[in-house]
Image (cartoon, rainbow, N blue to C red):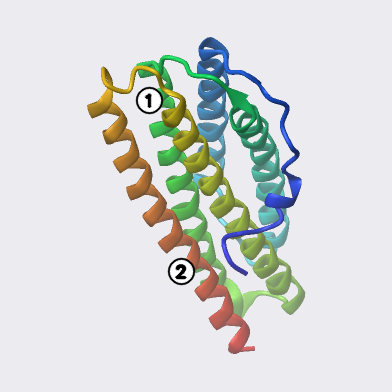
Amino acid sequence: AGIAGSFIALSAAPAQAALSPATLGTDLNNLVLKGNSLVATLTITKLTSVGAASQLSQLESSVASYQQSVLAVYNSVAGATGTFSVSNDVLMALQNLAAINTALSVGLQGLSVSVVTLKPTMFLSTFQSSQATILRLSDDIGEMANRILDMANKILVMADNIGLMADRILATQVIQSANLKVIVDAVLQTQVNMILLSAAL
């Protein structure tokens, strides 16, 4: 599976509307809070031979919920018209979201290594279920990263204070690009881990 997944199919054509800077800032900061909570959940997830499938299924549900929240904000930005002044708060939130997705992708890579380590002590059905969930999660996290990057680009295109904030906006773009590379590398390595395990069956 590649990093493009079923997430694209969930996108609906958003209605054209003006973008409220205050609402955007609130929405982005709410995504940061939810994302940080999800990262914390992933970080404390320690897979076991018997419980791996159930643990990963619970994580998948949490990621799906966060994914829907990201999609809702993305759709509001994608369907917006006009220009507005980009605040420091918005730029910081975009940077934080990039960092969150990086943490999620790296954390998932760590879980894929755990599956590799635990495979000899797993039932075949547990391994197969864990493998499938890891691959779906890698697709979802990769697609969320794409959506957040698209959202950041659209926001920066709509900025009417680009001259005033040029350095900060450039810094945001650099951070987004750097994080996206880490995400892509981690997601691909996760998928390679699962593919190599399949070949070894």
Identify which residue is drawn at 71% across, 73% down.
Answer: 128
Q: Residue furthest left?
A: 167
The residue identified by callout 1 is 92
Q: Residue furthest top?
A: 22
Circle 1: is it few (<14), some (14-19), or many (20+) Cα within 10 Å?
some
Circle 2: is it few (<14), some (14-19), or many (20+) Cα within 10 Å?
some
* Residue 81 location (% of width, % of height): 58, 23
Q: Residue furthest front?
A: 82
Question: For the residues carrying marks 2 and 1, which lies nearer the camera in this image?
Answer: 1
Which amino acid type corresponds to the residue marked 2 in the rendered image? Gln
Of the pair 187 and 107, the residue shown nearer to us: 187
Q: Is residue 135 above or below residue 10?
A: below
Quadrant for residue 88, please give it.
top left
User: Mark 1 and mark 2 in contact (Cβ < 8 Å)?
Assistant: no
Query: Looking at the rendering, in which quadrant would you find the N terminus?
Result: bottom right
* 107 left or right of 143 in image: left
* Residue 36 location (% of width, % of height): 50, 33
Quadrant for residue 201, please give it.
bottom right
Q: Residue furthest bottom?
A: 200
Q: How many marks?
A: 2
Q: Is residue 150 above or below residue 57?
A: above
Which amino acid type corresponds to the residue marked 1 in the rendered image? Met
Identify which residue is drawn at 67% across, 41% down.
Answer: 62
Determine the secondary structure under disc 2: helix
Mark identifier at residue 30: none
Q: How far, Cα to Cα, is label 2 from label 1? A: 29 Å
Determine the secondary structure under disc 1: helix
The residue identified by callout 2 is 189
Q: Is residue 121 above or below residue 61?
A: below
